[in-house]
Image: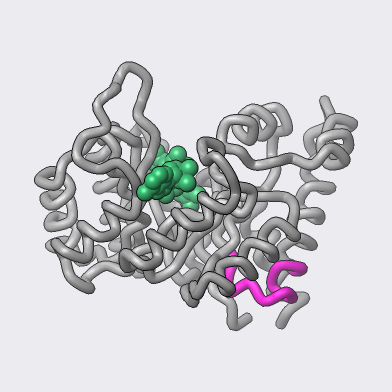
Amino acid sequence: MNQHISFEFFPAKTEQGNAKLIATSQTLAELKPEFFSVTFGAGGTDQDRTFNTVVSIQEKTGISTASHLTCVGSSRERIGSILDTYKANNINRIVALRGDLPMGMDDPGEFHFADELVSFIREHSGDHFHIEVAAYPEKHPQSIDHRSDLQNFVRKVDAGANSAITQYFYNTDAYSYFVDECAASGVTIPIIPGIMPIGNFENLSRFSDGCGAEVPRWLRARLETYEGDPSSLRAFADDYISEMCLTLIKRGAPGLHFYSMNQVEPNRYICNEVIKNIG
Ligand code: FAD
């Protein structure tokens, strides 16, 4: 398959969880991903855990590993020092994000939006980092309308992003229209669809409401019928997501980024289905 794949992890909270995550990344490395990435708590929470996870996954798998980096609530000095530490440890990919202020924090600090972070990374570290930014085919939940959200995305690209990863979605038309609109606005960087496999309907439903990803009515209804029958839900969902990935690739998506939830399956199954059917 010519298109690249990548897997996103979150840092584990225990030694045991961390050992399991390293083993998961080593298994997924067999699929030859372009990169792994590790999330970062907004407001700087979990910063050390993210750093240690990024460095050990890259060391143990030999696969380039990106750190997510949120800027809200932070300062130029602090972000500059994080970038220097990553550079000194041979990390050369950053997923640059604004993030959301954690409950109880109300000072946004020196950065207000992700485009300011992208500009700062370029100013501070030149071209050392490959910078990914977030994109929202179904609109960011805080955005007043789709057009201004698109303009704000273009701002991040103009600030120096190399590629983008989308919020997950279950409506492939939302992605296709978004990519066309970006191209019409002069965007040429790859926009990689973010893929969220479905493991647990209740969790997915709650999380989707918060991040502005729509679970279509027909899909919700179908998933609800599998309540109490997780293996039937998985069988349906894995095939549905595999088909969705194939549709995206056939329509020209440059790759697939999996929100892996730190699991080997169903990510490996879906990738293998795509590889088998695309060649
Ligand atoms: P921005 O691009 O700054 O956009 C945020 C909002 O502000 C949008 O509504 C946008 O339209 C608007 N906006 C942007 N620029 C301007 C401007 N100049 N003027 C006015 N309005 C503007 N969160 C974490 O905490 N940790 C993570 O590791 C993490 N990883 C993520 C990975 C991916 C691939 C994605 C899609 C999301 C991730 N998130 C993560 C969630 C993300 O932090 C939230 O969605 C956050 O609300 C927005 O971050 P952003 O970088 O997209 O912000």
Residue 195 position within the rendered picture, expressed as x and y whole percent measured from the top left: 62, 54
Is residue 195 rendered to the left or right of residue 243?
Answer: left
Q: Is residue 232 above or below residue 114?
A: above
Is residue 111 rendered to the left or right of residue 176?
Answer: left
**Nearest the camera: 232 or 246?**
246
Q: Is residue 124 above or below residue 41?
A: below
Residue 93 position within the rendered picture, expressed as x and y whole percent measured from the top left: 31, 64
- Residue at point 44% right, 68% down? 163
The residue furthest top is 104
- Residue at point 70% right, 34% down? 200
Ligand 1: image quarter:
top left
User: Quarter-wise, where is residue 210 in the image?
Assistant: top right
Residue 132 position within the rendered picture, expressed as x and y whole percent measured from the top left: 40, 62
- Residue at point 80% right, 54% down? 240
Is residue 241 rendered to the left or right of residue 74?
Answer: right
User: The magenta stretch spans which residues?
Assistant: 246-256
